Image: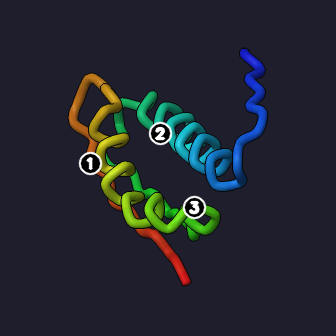
């Protein structure tokens, strides 16, 4: 494993990196089973510490991120996002 450190990043930048890295890890673990064809993603205020423009683009970035993951087969996603 690698240990990566970022310096001088805002709380929103750190949350963006951490959130998508954790999401990628969770998806990789789930799709290792060939029996899984649908993933339910529950995200609780994922954009809480983002700049307003980043919050506005979050859904676009999330969909682009999910579409970029090559699982070698068709996987469907259901996404539930809570916010205030």
Tell me how far mark 3 sits from mark 2, CA to CA.
23 Å
Q: Is residue 12 above or below residue 1?
A: below
Tell me how far mark 1 sits from mark 3, CA to CA.
27 Å
**Front residue of this view, candidates 1 and 59:** 59
Q: Is residue 6 above or below residue 38?
A: above
Residue that carries the numbered disc 1 in the rendered image: 76
Tell me whether the residue at label 1 lies in contact with that at label 2, contact meaning CB atoms closer than 8 angstroms: no
**Residue 5: image location, x then y, percent:** 77, 27
Residue that carries the numbered disc 2 in the rendered image: 27
Q: Is residue 44 above or below residue 13?
A: below
Tell me whether the residue at label 3 lies in contact with that at label 2, contact meaning CB atoms closer than 8 angstroms: no
Quick one: SS at disc 1? strand
65 vs 12, left or right, is left
Sort mark 3 into few (<14), some (14-19) or many (20+) by Cα contacts within 10 Å: some
- Quarter that holds the N terminus: top right
3 vs 70, left or right, is right
Name the residue at the front extreme.
Answer: 8
**Residue 43: image location, x then y, percent:** 52, 63
Tell me whether the residue at label 1 lies in contact with that at label 3, contact meaning CB atoms closer than 8 angstroms: no
Quick one: SS at disc 2? helix
Residue that carries the numbered disc 3 in the rendered image: 50
Give the residue drawn at x 27%, y 23%: 72
Which of disc 2 and disc 3 is earlier in sequence? 2
Instruction: Give the mark count.
Output: 3
- Quarter that holds the C terminus: bottom right
Q: Quadrant of residue 73?
A: top left
Tell me how far mark 1 sits from mark 2, CA to CA.
11 Å
Sort mark 1 into few (<14), some (14-19) or many (20+) by Cα contacts within 10 Å: few
Quick one: SS at disc 3? loop
**Residue 41: image location, x then y, percent:** 45, 57
Which of disc 2 and disc 1 is earlier in sequence? 2
Which of disc 3 and disc 1 is earlier in sequence? 3
């Amino acid at each position: 494993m690698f240990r990566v450190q970022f310096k001088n990043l805002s709380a929103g930048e750190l949350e963006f990196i951490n959130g998508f890295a954790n999401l990628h890890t969770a998806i990789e673990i789930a799709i290792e089973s060939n029996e899984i064809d649908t993933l339910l993603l529950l995200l609780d205020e994922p954009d809480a510490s983002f700049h307003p423009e980043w919050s506005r683009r979050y859904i676009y970035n999330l969909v682009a991120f999910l579409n970029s993951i090559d699982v070698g087969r068709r996987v469907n996603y259901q996404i539930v996002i809570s916010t205030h």
